[in-house]
Image (spheres, grey):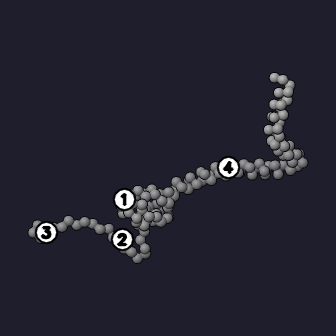
Amino acid sequence: MTFKTLQLNLSHLLSSLRPWLTLFIVFWLLGSLGLGWLVNSFLILVGLLFLAPIILFFGFRWWLQSNLINDRCPVCDNEVTGLNNTQLQCNNCGEQLFIQDKEIQRFTPEGTIDVNAIEVPSQSLEES
């Protein structure tokens, strides 16, 4: 390795480190002038910028797990997924549904009486 190659490699290394060295020198000067609080608050702000997306991701994931409801449609028994306390429509039968207290119910306007029909076997008069 020649002196010229070593000098070229060293100048390339210094040019790539120049922004970091400048930043370090600025922080060092601010700290030596009694402005350490400014450096600390900047470092705290940078730390929060890195931590905020992680905290938001896990917070959103927890919220989604506690509010995402997966149940069966009361009309057609098809699997339906929705958020708690929201109104949605069944993909299979088109029935309006409402999710309340982590349970899927038919959405009926006030004053509507919901009746469950049962099948009664017919009997002829002669059998009785």
Vertical comparison of 14 with 97: above or below: above
Q: Which mark is residue 124?
A: 3
- The residue closer to the viewer here, 76 or 61, is 76
Q: Amino acid at mark 4?
A: Leu
Residue 21 shown left or right of residue 84 in the figure? right
Closer mark to the observer between disc 1 and disc 2: 1
Toward which corner of the image does residue 76 lie, by quadrant? bottom left
Residue hosting label 2: 114
- The residue closer to the viewer here, 3 or 97, is 3
Q: Disc 4 versus disc 2: distance between alpha carbons?
A: 51 Å
Toward which corner of the image does residue 22 lie, by quadrant? top right
Q: Disc 4 versus disc 3: distance between alpha carbons?
A: 76 Å
Labels 4 & 2 near each other (Cβ < 8 A): no
Residue 98 shown left or right of residue 22 in the figure? left
Tag 1 or tag 4, which sits nearer the N-term? 4
Residue at the far top: name it: 1
Q: Amino acid at mark 3?
A: Ser
Q: How many marks?
A: 4
Tag 3 or tag 2, which sits nearer the N-term? 2
Q: Which quarter of the figure is the C terminus placed in?
A: bottom left
Residue hosting label 1: 77
User: Secondary structure beneath disc 2?
Assistant: loop
